[in-house]
Amino acid sequence: VARLQIERADLSKELLTIDEVAEMLKVSKMTLHRWDKLGILKKIEVGGKRRYRKSDVEAVTFNRK
C-alpha cells in the first residue's frame, strides 16, 4: 500500500494540468486540444481529467526553439 502511494505521488508530480501546460507553453487551451488531435502533444485521461506528461511538454518546448 505504501509503495502504491509513493508511485501515485511521483506520478502526480509528473502530470500537469491543462492550465499549467497552457501557461508554460504560452498557448491557448484550444491549441493544446488541436495539438492532441494532431499528435503533437498527447493528453492523458486521469479520472476524467486531462493531464499531460511533464516529459512530453518539455520535449515540445525543446522542439519549438
Image (cartoon, rainbow, N blue to C red):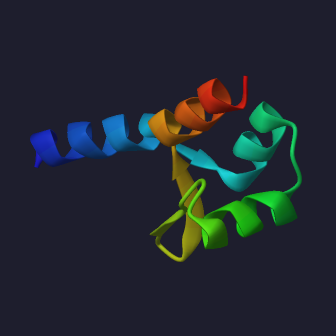
Residue 7 screen position, x and y as percent? 23, 41
**Number of numbered markers:** 0
Name the quarter where the C terminus is drawn. top right
Above or below — where is 58 with respect to 12?
Answer: above
Q: Residue at x 79, y 45 (%)?
A: 22
Q: Is residue 49 left or right of residue 1?
A: right
Q: Residue at x 76, y 32 (%)?
A: 24
Above or below — where is 34 with respect to 2?
Answer: below
**Most foreground residue, 31 or 2:** 31
Q: In which quarter of the image is residue 11?
A: top left
Q: Quadrant of residue 58?
A: top right
Point out the residue furthest to the bottom here.
Answer: 48
Above or below — where is 48 with respect to 59?
Answer: below
**Most foreground residue, 47 or 5:** 47
**Most foreground residue, 50 or 35:** 35
Residue 20 screen position, x and y as percent? 73, 41
Q: Residue at x 75, y 68 (%)?
A: 34
Q: Residue at x 63, y 67 (%)?
A: 38
Residue 27 screen position, x and y as percent? 87, 46
